[in-house]
Structure formats: C-alpha cells, structure tokens
Image: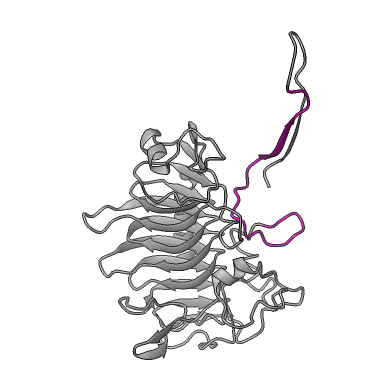
Amino acid sequence: MRKCLFLVIVIMFIGILKSYSAQWTVSNNPNMPAQFGSVQTAIDSAAAGDTIFVYNSPNSYGNVNVTKKLHIIGAGYWGVWISGRESTNCSYTILADSVTIEGMYGSVSIGRVSPALLVKGIILKNLYMGTIDLQRVDACLIYNSICENIQIFDKNYYVENIIVSNNIINRLYNPRGSNMFVLNNIFFIDTYSSNPPYWLGSLIFQGGYGSTKYTIFQNNIFSKGSPIQAEYSSFNNNLTFNSRQNTLPYSNNNGANNIINQDPKYRGSNALDGWNSVHRVVEQNIDLRLADDSPARNAGADSTDIGISGGLYPWPRNADGTYDYSGRPRLPEIESFNLVNPIVGTDGTLRFNVKGNKAR
C-alpha cells in the first residue's frame, strides 16, 4: 500500500516538469546586467509558466512572494562560505501551485496558515536552505539540497504527500504531516536544549509541538545525527553510527534491515570530526562519498546505496567524480567569450572564441 501511495505522489510531479514558456533574467549585481534588478519585480511581470534566471550577486535579493506557477533557477549557492565569491541569496514564500526553485541560497516557506492558503505540486532542488518551512502544502518534492531545518513547525499546519530525498540535513521535524517519505538523506547533527538540558536529536525542533510522527525513513544515514524523538514511524534500511539512538526501530516505531552503529566509511577523513553541521560540509568541502567497502554500498531497500549516492536522485557530481556542493544548475553555459577582431569593416567577418559546456 505504501509503495503504491509513493508512486502516486511521484506521478503528481510529472506535469510540473514540462517545458516552461518565456525566460527572464534578474541581477542586482552592477557588474552583471539583466532584464530585471529585482526577483519580485520579475515575478510580478512574468506570466504563469515562465522561467526566471537569477544571477549571482554580492547583494541579497531580499524577501519574495511567488504568486504564480514559475520555474526559478539561481546560479548556485557556491559562494556562500567562500570569501570573495557570490551567491544567489533570497527568502521565498511560495503562494502558488506548481512552483519549482533551484540553485538558490536562503530560506523557503510554502503555503500560508492565516489567511489559509494551500498550495500543491512544489519542487525544490539544488538548494542551500537555512529553513524550509512547510505550512500548508499537498505534494512537495525536496531533493539534492543542503538544509539546516526542514520543518512543520506549527500545530495548525496542513501538510501531506512530501518526499524528502537525497539531501544533507541537520534536522527534520514532522509532528503532524501525513504521507512523508524521507529517503536517502544524511543526517549530520544532534540538537541540544539548554533549558531544560537534554538532547533532542535530528527529528525534533526546539519549541515545536512534539516528536516526529507518521513518517517513513528509508535508506538514510544517521552519522552523529540521532533518530530519536520519532513515534509511529517506519525505519527501513537505514544506517546509524555514533548516534544517541543507534538501535532501529525503537519504541512504537517499526521497520527492518537497518544497519546498527557501523561506520559508513565516508572517503573524507574529516567527515566525522568534531561538531558536524551542513555548514561545515560546504565550508570544508567534506568528501561524503562512500568508500568501496562501506556497509552502505548497495544496502538500500532498492538495492542502491544507503545515503545520497543511491535512491531516486543521486547527488550531482563534478567531472572528477567528487560531489558537487555548488548548487549550479545542470544547464548548458558559456564560460568565456572573446572577440578576436572587435572592429569589423563593411562586409567584414566578426571572429570570436566561445568556451562553454553542455548540460552537466
């Protein structure tokens, strides 16, 4: 039954992936001209179904309301933790159906509690988010993203049919959403409450409304991140290591085929050093690829890897095989353009050199 339900949810996203209409560019970087200087102005001017490209900038694009079906593509988050580089920083509130956002840094809020607004068919990918706040949404796919928090924070939120797949996450909190599938993620951190002092783990957000419930966890790695504070949930083919809750399942949860307290054997020698967080993964370019003898290799419920290299959306890679933590869209791009003869006479020939690449 759960497999059938999962397939239905996946099919719901197929219509969103159709081609979009007009394309627009946005930049508030004085060195990068574009058609619009504001993301909000571009959204207000665009027609439903258009694509908006957002360039890197040293300046934040601020708070934005997405009020129509759009595909918003940022140039990546690759400069967030690297001095002298730029990113596409923006905070989105999604208030329309069938919105896709990728290649951005910032935060996302989906739907609205008051006045109530339910949105459907949202896709978030290749993002670096402080928080993804699910308020009122039916059918949302989040993948290949680095997220500090994915949360259903308020008891009045309405959330159904969520797929969280192939992400690197600090915390995920789901006290009331139904039909949430959490697949092939890496959880990296515990949460500590100082008042009163106790460990919350990776599946609860301090100040929220209870533990994570009614969630299917499959093919995830909990390395230092602890899967405590879950109830009435399923844990299948997950791997735990050096966590405060290594044994799965526990309490009133169910599941099978979990790998208990075994080193996932990341290739990066510093992957499990000290206090881990998603920020450190990007800042230090930690190599989270699995070693050839990792117990997570081909150990998932679908016979692919446990963690971000397996499942539905394996993590994007660079040309050398390392994981790509840039968030750059997988699109053809021109890397350089040089005019050989900038002055051309009548009936002359303009010569130029272009260096680019195909969709990565």
Work out whether residue 317 or residue 119 is closer to the camera in this orientation and state it.
317
Work out whether residue 157 or residue 288 is closer to the camera in this orientation and state it.
288
160 in relation to 295, above or below: above
Locate residue 190, reporting x and y percent.
49, 81
Q: Where, quadrant-wise, is the N terminus in this rendering? A: bottom left
Please tell me which residue is depicted at 34% across the width and 73% down the height of the picture: 175
Please tell me which residue is depicted at 47% across the width and 78% down the height of the picture: 202
Please tell me which residue is depicted at 32% across the width and 55% down the height of the picture: 111
Q: Is residue 241 visible?
A: yes
Locate residue 284, reporting x and y percent.
65, 69
128 in relation to 173, above or below: above
Residue 341 is covered by the magenta coloring: yes
Overall secondary structure of the magenta stretch?
loop
Residue most extreme to the left: 115
Question: How are the residues colored?
Answer: one colour
Quadrant of the rendered image containing residue 140:
bottom left
183 in relation to 43, above or below: below
29 in relation to 130, above or below: above
Residue most extreme to the top: 346
Span of residues in magenta: 317-342
* Image side of residue 212 versus residue 82, left or right: left
Q: Is residue 1 visible?
A: no
Residue 194 is covered by the magenta coloring: no
Please tell me which residue is depicted at 64% across the width and 82% down the height of the picture: 273
Locate residue 51, reporting x and y percent.
48, 38
Locate residue 136, reporting x and y percent.
31, 58
* Number of numbered discs overlaid on the protein picture: 0
* Image side of residue 142 versus residue 232, left or right: right
